[in-house]
């Protein structure tokens, strides 16, 4: 008999949390900055995205995903690109496996 315990689960199970994200009701432009956006405009847009994330039922899964795959752009799990970079840098410097 074939041993199936080592086989990966259904792919849908890995991504299904995304269907529950509060961001699905909001346009991508809130979470991803246009080229060249700086200063107060970027801070306001980032804050608007974080506000959506605050009440999201899957914020933790989203944050873990973004850190695990090193999402390079946008606000994910309530974290900006710079915030994710800082967490990952701290993890690497301290040898931490998970500072989420």
Image: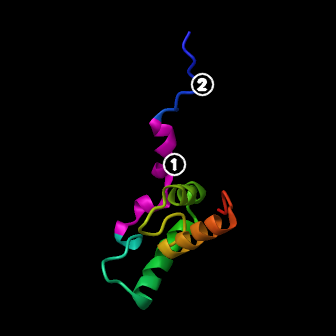
User: Going 69% across and 67% down the picture, which residue do you hit?
Assistant: 94
Residue receiving disc 1: 17
Taking 60 as reference, is 43 above or below it?
A: below
In percent of width and height, residue 82 lies at: 51, 75
User: Going 39% across and 87% down the picture, which residue do you hit?
Assistant: 38
Figure disc tally: 2
Mark 1 and mark 2: span between their CA atoms? 23 Å
Q: Residues within 10 Å of mark 2 (few under 14, many from 20)?
A: few
User: Going 57% across and 73% down the picture, which residue do you hit?
Assistant: 86
List the single residue furthest toward the bottom.
40
Q: Which mark is residue 5?
A: 2
In percent of width and height, residue 7 lies at: 53, 27
Taking 35 as reference, is 77 above or below it?
A: above
Q: Which residues are magenta?
A: 11-28
Q: Residues within 10 Å of mark 1 (few under 14, many from 20)?
A: some
Left or right: 19 as drawn, with respect to 97? left
User: Going 45% across and 62% down the picture, which residue do you hit?
Assistant: 71
Q: Is residue 76 magenta?
A: no
- Name the quarter where the N terminus is drawn: top right
List the single residue furthest toward the left.
35
Q: Which mark is residue 97?
A: none
């Amino acid at each position: 008999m074939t041993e199936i315990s080592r086989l990966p689960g259904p792919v849908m199970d890995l991504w299904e949390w995304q269907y529950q994200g509060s961001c699905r009701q909001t346009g991508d432009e809130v979470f991803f900055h246009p080229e060249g956006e700086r200063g107060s405009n970027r801070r306001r847009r980032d804050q608007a995205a974080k506000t959506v994330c605050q009440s999201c039922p899957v914020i933790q899964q989203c944050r873990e995903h973004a850190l695990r795959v090193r999402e390079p752009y946008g606000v994910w799990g309530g974290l900006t690109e710079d915030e994710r970079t800082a967490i990952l840098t701290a993890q690497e410097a301290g040898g931490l496996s998970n500072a989420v």
